[in-house]
Image (tube, rainbow, N blue to C red):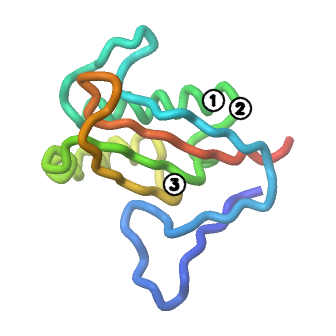
């Protein structure tokens, strides 16, 4: 049971995300905020781009525990403390996205915040996914 992208006819198409996603039914999985640390809770880098890769890999690892994959992510929220680094890294962030998520773009929000709990985190990602019934 695939998801349906919701795109109002008279709107310009978004770049890198969907305005909305509709899913008929399935198992809902909520993935808590993931930062750029590895399984041992050690940060892979103090830089935003490698932290983004690790945080997204962490989202997918948690989702895999429920039998899900990238295509099941319906919503992704990013909390970032470094807007200039995000803007400067957008091209590389896009390459990372493609390598892990392919051409799947869920409904997404990017929120810039003053700080995150786990220093030296620069970005935190949380996701909601729907896995179709077997």
Furthest residue in direction right, as rendered: 134
- Look at the numbered disc 3 and give the secondary structure of its residue: loop
Is 67 situated left or right of 70 in this image? right
Q: Sequence order check: which comes first, mark 3 or mark 1?
A: 1
Q: Residues within 10 Å of mark 2 (few under 14, many from 20)?
A: few
Is 93 situated left or right of 78 in this image? left
Mark-to-mark CA distance, 1 and 2: 5 Å
- Look at the numbered disc 2 and give the secondary structure of its residue: loop
Q: Quadrant of residue 17?
A: bottom left
Q: What residue is at 35 percent from the left and 33 percent from the top?
A: 53
Seen in the picture, residue 94 relative to 11 is either above or below; the reply is above
Q: Quadrant of residue 38?
A: top left
Q: Which residue is mark 3?
A: 104
Furthest residue in direction bottom, as rendered: 10
Residue 19 is situated, as x and y percent measured from the top left of the image, at 50, 69
Q: Which residue is mark 1?
A: 64
Residue nearest the observer in this picture, 129 or 70: 129
Which quadrant: the C terminus?
top right
Q: Sequence order check: which comes first, mark 2 or mark 3?
A: 2
Q: Are marks 1 and 2 in contact (CB under 8 Å)?
A: yes
Q: Quadrant of residue 52?
A: top left
Q: Residues within 10 Å of mark 3 (few under 14, many from 20)?
A: some
Residue 67 — which label?
2
Q: What residue is at 40 percent from the left and 31 percent from the top?
A: 55
Residue 46 — which label?
none
Which quadrant: the N terminus?
bottom right
Residue 83 is situated, as x and y percent measured from the top left of the image, at 19, 49
Q: What residue is at 28 percent from the left and 19 percent from the top?
A: 44
């Amino acid at each position: 049971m695939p998801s349906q992208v919701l795109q109002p006819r008279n709107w310009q198409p978004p770049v890198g995300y969907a305005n909305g996603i509709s899913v008929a039914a399935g198992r809902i999985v909520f993935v808590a905020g993931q930062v750029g640390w590895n399984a041992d809770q050690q940060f892979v880098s103090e830089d935003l781009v490698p932290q983004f890769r690790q945080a997204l890999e962490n989202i997918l690892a948690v989702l895999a525990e429920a039998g899900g994959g990238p295509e099941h992510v319906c919503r992704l929220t990013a909390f970032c403390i470094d807007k200039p680094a995000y803007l400067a890294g957008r091209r590389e962030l896009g390459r990372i996205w493609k390598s892990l998520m392919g051409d799947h773009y869920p409904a997404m929000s990017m929120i810039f915040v003053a700080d995150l709990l786990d220093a030296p985190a620069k970005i935190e990602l949380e996701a909601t996914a729907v896995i179709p019934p077997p």
